[in-house]
Each structure stands twice: as C-alpha cells, then as structure tokens.
Image: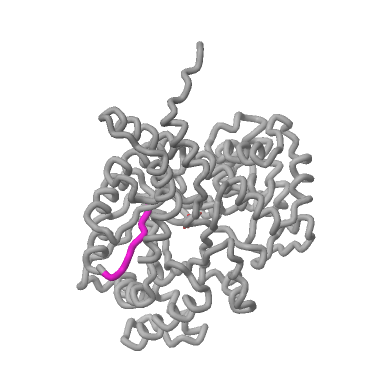
C-alpha cells in the first residue's frame, strides 16, 4: 500500500511543535550542584546526589521497578533482596526481564529505547555494557546541555522538597546550590497540608515555634517558615501533591490541612504573587515495598478546587489530577475560573492513548489556554522521550483541530500556528506565573 502524504497543514503544525522550545513546568531534576551518584567523566560521584542520569537510572526508574515485579514476583525475588542489589544489578535484572525476556511494549519501556535512539545509540544492539560505557564518558553538566538540546527544552523546573532532609541540607550548606540558570526552583511542601502535626514537630525542631494547635502564633510562625524558604530557594511557585481524599470545604472547614491552606499557604503565596500548584489524586504507598513505585491513583474532588478558585481570587492555581475520571470535570472547572490553569498528563496518564484523549478534550473545551504536558522526569535523559512522544501527540491533535477550521474556509497563517505552539509549550506557563 502507498502511504498517504501528510497535508502541508499537518506538516506545518508538527514543525511548529517540534521547533518550539518547551519550558518544562514540573520535573524532579536537579543541576550538578546537588550532586550526582553517577560521576561520569568528571568522576565526582555523590551516592546521595539528587541529579540522576544515565542508563542504569533509566532502567531503574520506579515505573519499571513496578513493571518488573509483574514478571518476577516478590515470591521469587523478595523486595528486600532487590533493594540490596547494586544499581547496576537492578538494571541488569530489569533489562533482562522487561526488554529481553519479553517485548518492551509499555510506554515506560519504550521510553528507554526512544532515549537511546535519540542520543545516537542503536537500540537494536541490545548491548547494555556498550551503552554503559558510552554514558560513563559523559560529563554531567555538558550532558545536561546536550539532553536539553535534543529534547528542545529551554528550562527545567525543579521540585525542591523542603521536608526532604537530604535536599534541605544542601540548600542550607550552599545558598547558591539552586542558581544554575537552566533550572527554575519550586518550593514543595506536602507535609504542611498532608500532615500538620508532623510538619509542626519538624518546624519547631528547625527553630520555628509552630505547634500542633493552630493558634495565631503557630500560624504566623508557619508563614515565617514559608517566607524564609521562598527567599532561600527563590521558588517560582509553591507546590503540593494531595491524596484523593483531599477536600476544601470553605471558610468553615477547620481540618488542620484546610486551616494551613487558608491561613498559611495561600496568604503567603498571594503576598508574593506566586501561583500554587496542586497535584491531586495520589494515594501513597499502597505497596510500600515498591518504594516510589508503590503509589496508586484515586478519584478526587473537583468541587474543592472550584471552592478554592472562587474563595481566593487573589491566588492563582495550577492543577493536575491523576484519575482519568476527574479530567472532564476539571476542564469544565477551568472554564469557570481564569485563576485556574490545568496542566500535564500526570504519571499514570502519561500514556499515548490518554495524552491524545486529554489533549483533544482540553482543546475542545479550552482552546489553546492550558498547559498540555510536563515531563515529571526523575532521570535527566527521560526529557528526551517524554517530550518526543508528547510533542508528536500534541501536534496530531493541533493539526486535526486546524484541519476542522480549514474545512470552514478559515485560513490560519504560519505565524498563527507558531503562536499556538508557543502558547502550549511555553507562554501559557510563563504568563500565568507572571500573573
Ligand atoms: O510530584 C509527584 O508527587 C509525583 O509526580 C512523583 O512523586 C511521582 O513519583 C513521579 O515520578 C510521577 O511521575
Ligand atoms: Zn512529580
């Protein structure tokens, strides 16, 4: 059969999307100043370092740890034994079970292969040792430039988790740790909303008089803590992930999480003019033995998001939800409030069929006024596949929508198509940040 040539319009759209640099609004990536366990050619390996990159990290991504436990169950390989293995042994196991013993059909497996191919390695070699020696020759900082160029990412947004002791120490030890211009900091403080009592204990250890009882003084000191860390990190927004059970019931809702949100988080972010990102629907550690791979998804409450957007018009909210079942309702919520910006196809939604579905539905309901994707990369090199796969899907949807417009006689110019691409991949985020 002969292939049908793409129309000039579809070609124009895909070129515009490919060529538009993306500002990735949510990752778990860091500059080399935070240390890296794989030293590469610079040889400066820091076992607790936060910058993950290279083939062994790609293969031991928590998505793949969860997948390999479907092939070799815990009755055959106890979790404790897996976690005792070296990173390289874990990677060997995953490579064998998910790539050699079975076809690597899942999106997370396919991503490893796209990444290798775009880096100029040949996936058909199936030569793990050869890939390893190629990665070992890379210098981490130069390699960041190379990955950003291949992925066409202009800026990487970090997730700076203030309650993570490892990361916290690094900020305290070096005030410049976060100043690599390729990376933008974000202050992440889940504990304040998910576990006030625990957060209060830590804050008081750290010199802030914050107690389980949410007295005026406690709340003021918690605001002081947030202000200090926004100053220290220069975070461009504040962020949390929330469980499916998250509710905000309005001014009379006196649960500790709601009080912390209303009295601490939202006022401080409003005073700084910074948006607040809510990632809602992750049920943590249903299988804790899988560590980061042990979280699951649950349906959440869009009504709470509506209440927040209405009751706090001086705040701006980024929101993404993890359950497919919440997506349509969340899109409708974004039609009601201009201070709500929906973003990304988060985690278990980051699969081609769902990215296509969500992007299509969002464009039909919201036009170009949303942020179609973030990478959530935990391993630097993942930027390559996450953006390659997503860009192709976003371009297909945008081209279809332009084809529908063309059918009416509407003629989009090349500049207009490039403007769409820029809004979707860069400026919707940038402008929402600016307020
Ligand atoms: O930011 C989050 O809470 C999540 O995106 C992550 O914790 C999650 O493990 C991530 O790897 C998902 O893609
Ligand atoms: Zn994340």
Q: Does the magenta stretch include residue 319?
A: yes
Quarter occupied by the C terminus: bottom left
User: Is residue 81 in view?
Assistant: no
Q: In which quarter of the view is residue 358 placed?
A: top left
Q: Is residue 111 left or right of residue 264?
A: right
Q: Give the x, y percent position of residue 158.
A: 53, 62
Residue 187 sits above or below residue 139 on the image: below
The residue lying toward the viewer, choosing from 125 and 435, is 435
Residue sitting at the far top: 1
Q: In which quarter of the view is residue 199 placed?
A: bottom left
Q: Give the x, y percent position of residue 391.
A: 48, 41
Residue pictured at 69% horizontal, 59% vertical? 141
Residue pictured at 65% horizontal, 55% vertical? 144
Q: Give the x, y percent position of residue 140.
A: 71, 57
Residue 278 sits above or below residue 392 on the image: below
The residue lying toward the viewer, choosing from 72 and 309, is 309
Residue pictured at 78% horizontal, 40% vertical? 130
Range of magenta residues: 314-320
Q: Give the x, y percent position of residue 251.
A: 21, 72
Q: Is residue 387 left or right of residue 217?
A: right
Residue sitting at the far left: 252
């Amino acid at each position: 059969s002969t292939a049908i040539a793409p129309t000039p319009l579809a070609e124009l759209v895909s070129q515009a999307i490919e060529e538009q640099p993306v500002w990735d609004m949510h990752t778990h990536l860091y500059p080399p100043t935070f240390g890296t366990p794989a030293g590469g050619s610079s040889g400066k390996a820091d076992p607790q370092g936060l910058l993950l990159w290279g083939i062994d990290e790609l293969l031991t991504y928590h998505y793949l740890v969860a997948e390999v436990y479907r092939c070799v169950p815990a009755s055959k390989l106890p979790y404790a034994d897996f976690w005792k293995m070296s990173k390289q042994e874990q990677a060997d196991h995953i490579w064998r079970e998910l790539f050699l013993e079975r076809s690597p059909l899942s999106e997370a497996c396919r991503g490893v292969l796209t990444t290798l191919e775009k880096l100029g390695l040949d996936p058909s070699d199936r030569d793990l040792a050869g890939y390893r020696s190629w990665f070992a020759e890379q210098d981490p900082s130069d390699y960041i430039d190379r990955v950003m160029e291949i992925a066409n990412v202009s800026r990487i947004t970090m997730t700076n988790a203030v309650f993570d002791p490892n990361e916290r120490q690094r900020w305290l030890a070096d005030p410049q740790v976060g100043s690599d211009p390729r990376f933008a900091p974000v202050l992440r403080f889940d504990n304040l909303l998910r576990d006030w009592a625990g957060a209060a204990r830590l804050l008081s250890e750290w010199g802030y008089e914050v107690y389980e009882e949410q007295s005026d003084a406690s709340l003021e000191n918690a605001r002081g803590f947030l202000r200090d860390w926004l100053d220290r990190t220069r975070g461009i927004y504040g962020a949390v992930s929330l469980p499916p059970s998250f509710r905000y019931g309005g001014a009379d809702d006196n649960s500790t999480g709601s009080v912390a949100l209303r009295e601490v988080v939202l006022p401080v972010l409003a005073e700084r003019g910074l948006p607040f990102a809510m990632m809602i629907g992750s049920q943590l550690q249903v299988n804790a033995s899988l560590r980061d791979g042990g979280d699951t998804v649950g349906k959440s409450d869009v009504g709470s998001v509506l209440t927040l957007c209405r009751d706090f018009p001086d705040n701006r909210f980024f929101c993404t939800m993890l359950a497919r079942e919440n997506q349509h309702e969340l899109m409708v919520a974004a039609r009601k409030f201009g201070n709500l910006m929906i973003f990304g196809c988060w985690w278990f939604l980051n699969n081609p069929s769902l990215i296509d579905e969500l992007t299509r539905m969002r464009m039909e309901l919201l036009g170009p006024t949303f942020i179609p994707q973030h990478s959530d990369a935990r391993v630097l090199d993942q930027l390559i596949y996450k953006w390659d796969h997503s860009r192709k899907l976003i371009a297909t949807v945008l081209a279809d929508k332009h084809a529908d417009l063309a059918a009416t006689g509407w003629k989009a110019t090349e500049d207009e198509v490039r403007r769409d691409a820029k809004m979707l991949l860069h400026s919707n985020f940038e402008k929402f940040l600016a307020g």
